[in-house]
Amino acid sequence: MTDLDTFRSETRAWLEANCPPEMREPMRSEADACWGGRNPNFQSDAQRQWMEKMAKRGWTVPHWPKDYGGGGLSTAETKVLKEEMARIGARSPLTSFGISMLGPALLKFGTEEQKKHFLPQIARGEIRWCQGYSEPGAGSDLAGLATKAEDKGDHWLINGQKVWTSYADKADWIFCLVRTSTESKHQGISFVLFDMTTPGVSTKPIKLISGYSPFCETFFDDVKVPKEQVVGEVNRGWDVAKYLLGHEREMIAGMGLGGIGGGEGGSLGAKLKPDNALLRADIAAFDVDALAFAAMSERFFEMFKAGEAHPASPSMMKYAGTELNKRRHELVMAAGGSDALEWDSERSKDGKAARDWLRTKGNSIEGGTSEIQLNIVAKHILGLPGA
Amino acid sequence: MPLLTDDQKMLQETASSFLSEEGSIAKQLRQLRDSGCTDGYGTDLWKQFGELGLTGICIPEDKGGLGLGSVEAALVLEEIGRNLTPSPFLATAVVGARAIEGTAHADRWYPGILSGDAVLTLAVDESRRHSPEQTALTAERRGNGFVLNGTKQFVVHGNSADVALTAARTSGTAGEREGLTLFAVPKGAAEVESVTLADSSKAARLTFRDVQLDADAVVGDVDNGWAQLSRALNSGRAGAAAELVGVAAGATSMTVDYLKQRKQFGKLIGEFQALQHRAAHLYGEIEIARAAALKAAELVDSGSEKAELMASVAKAKAADVASLAGREGVQMHGGIGMTDEHDIGLYLKREAVLGELFGDVYYHRNRVAELSGY
């Protein structure tokens, strides 16, 4: 037996012994995810146990170094762990922007002290993070952000407003882009971390067309942040932000597989059983595109891991994946007819089809609009002038 | 889909430099077209394919081939597509070689395929739409052999092929998968009407009037030809998808170059966002089509039960994308794109022919729906 085979059999045995049966049930919605945090809202003891047991082994972030709370697994071992988890249908033990976004940025740009302090907290699910990027006046033109951080000697004094902050009302800390210089647009931005309970921070949920409120407005009124809570160099936060956006886009692009609201990526037609020939034709065209995109996702992750992917390629994936997901939900609505329009009945699970459909409209806006992704591809991959 | 191995990358480089030099539009497609070549492909170039070993990609090593498969063939086909190289590679070295694999005909034809002398082709379609189940051409037993009656069309390279692997009905009725048999029909047995297609390639309409064949003309088993035909067709579909990806990539690379050169209103037209976004969209679509084509090739090679589904996905997707690349290519070139002098229009023509080969977009979307159970 190779080492990897040994690892697989040990992993299989451990998962069998430690993954509670409830955590092997498919997630019904986003609400079933475990987000951790200072005031964790565990749905069950099983959910808590599962997170804690996995965190103890470092398996909430299996590929991070052990020193920072990770599992120290190789790429091949990480893949085995994922396969073994998938085999028994194990849920992700912890869903977190700390893992998917801040962590990779800290690993690349953080000081040793920052890594030792923040990463293990993320790995154990102790701190729930949110992302302070967009502002009312800085959406697609993110670098036009105006939230001001003044140098007050031993601290930064932060004033301004963020918008579209995911789960800001539930988060413990924020990673936030602030303006530390007005001399240069891109090179006057810094990447700071602070506690959401700091005096002067307040949040207000935004109600979406779906009726859900996953986002907030976040206000900063004379918020004092210790000087050492800057990641990377002062005024060079744009580099960190861009790196992190790449990870975010990768995550969102995965939705094209049907990860959000659309099932597990199986055939849409098989699920919808269209009874109209023209609708069937549209759905078949969609299934072709979805299966081709699934092949692309597989190839993309392989290329990304091997360092063969173009640095701007997550933009292509994000664009294609989110547009596909919107199409999927248009077809779900079309196949559902008037049933799919019900908004509050038990029959419709409180309008799940309609609400999910409306929610997907945001996919091609959040994390950089489709148009911004196309700009990035045009400039960085195709080398078109003036883009 | 694992990434390409070093050997595969090397093969890709060989094919790329060989075809961009020897198989270029100027040296092959235009030269053959404008000189009125009746074969529709360059026989010298086909020999060179043989000398490089490329014709043996799908032939086992113990038979003198490279013993590789559809993934490697796809790498070569993408370069063929990119250069619009007229070549019997797909029909002969991929579909032909696959169709006769494991039969008595392999020993007869492998040497000619390997040396770049023989051309094999598949004769399936009988109407303007691809529909192999509808095969109606009959093969009746007579004495020690068979007598064939019926017609075939869209037989690529059918005017020059040494053998047309012909799907015929030995029992049952049109619409059934059972009762089909594949025959190796030698040149001269059927009446040939040579047709030049929109892309200057040659295809044939074959008429069978009491064509007598010996029993050993049967490729595989009598009445059980469907599985064999499907295997050959699926390798052809995956291959055509890869070639279409090349066509799309070639057209788009030409178009993007043009956007960086052409000036209007005192600006390079590539500065206009209306064009940038369409070019960027195309880029993504081509990447996706390539992934689908490689995935299909991989599944065809491994004999996966999903091979048929993925071959249809790849063929439909690549045809869609190549069509978009051809249409956008001509439009973004403006007036010059409408002229015969410019190469961009040649991509549009090639894409249309390849898109039809082994089933068009509608055929394959419908297959995807059927295979998915709706």
Image: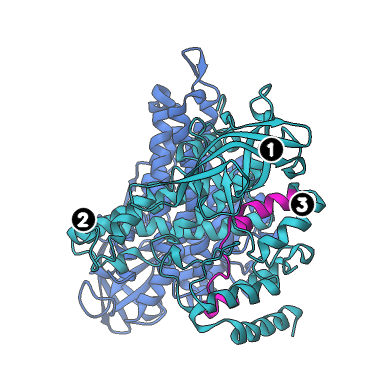
Chain colours: A cyan, B blue
Q: Which mark is residue A237?
A: 1
Amino acid carrying label 3: it is: Gln
Looking at the image, residue A115 sits to the left or right of residue A280; the answer is right
What amino acid type is highlighted by mark number 1? Gly
Q: Nearer the viewer, residue B115 or A363?
A: A363
**Span highlighted in magenta in the image:** A84-108
Say which residue label 2 marks. A278
Lower sequence index among marks 2 and 3: 3
Q: Pinpoint residue B104: horizontal percent, then vertical percent.
A: 49, 79
Pointer 3 residue: A114
Q: Residue at x 30, y 64 (%)?
A: A269
Q: Is residue B126 magenta?
A: no
Query: In terms of sequence position, does the residue under pointer 3 or pointer 1 come before the other?
Result: 3
Alpha carbons under labels 2 and 3: distance apart: 57 Å
Residue visible at 64% across and 66% down in the picture: B66
Please tell me which residue is depicted at 24% across the width and 80% down the height of the picture. B171
Camera-nearest label, 3 or 1: 3
Residue B298 located left or right of residue A2: left
Of the 4 image quadrants, the one containing the N terminus of chain B is bottom right
Q: Is residue A131 left or right of residue B163?
A: right
On the image, the x and y values in percent for residue B340 come to 41, 28
Q: Disc 1 is attached to a residue of which chain?
A: A
Question: Upstream in the sequence, badge 1 or badge 2?
Answer: 1
Q: CA distance from mark 3 to mark 1?
A: 15 Å
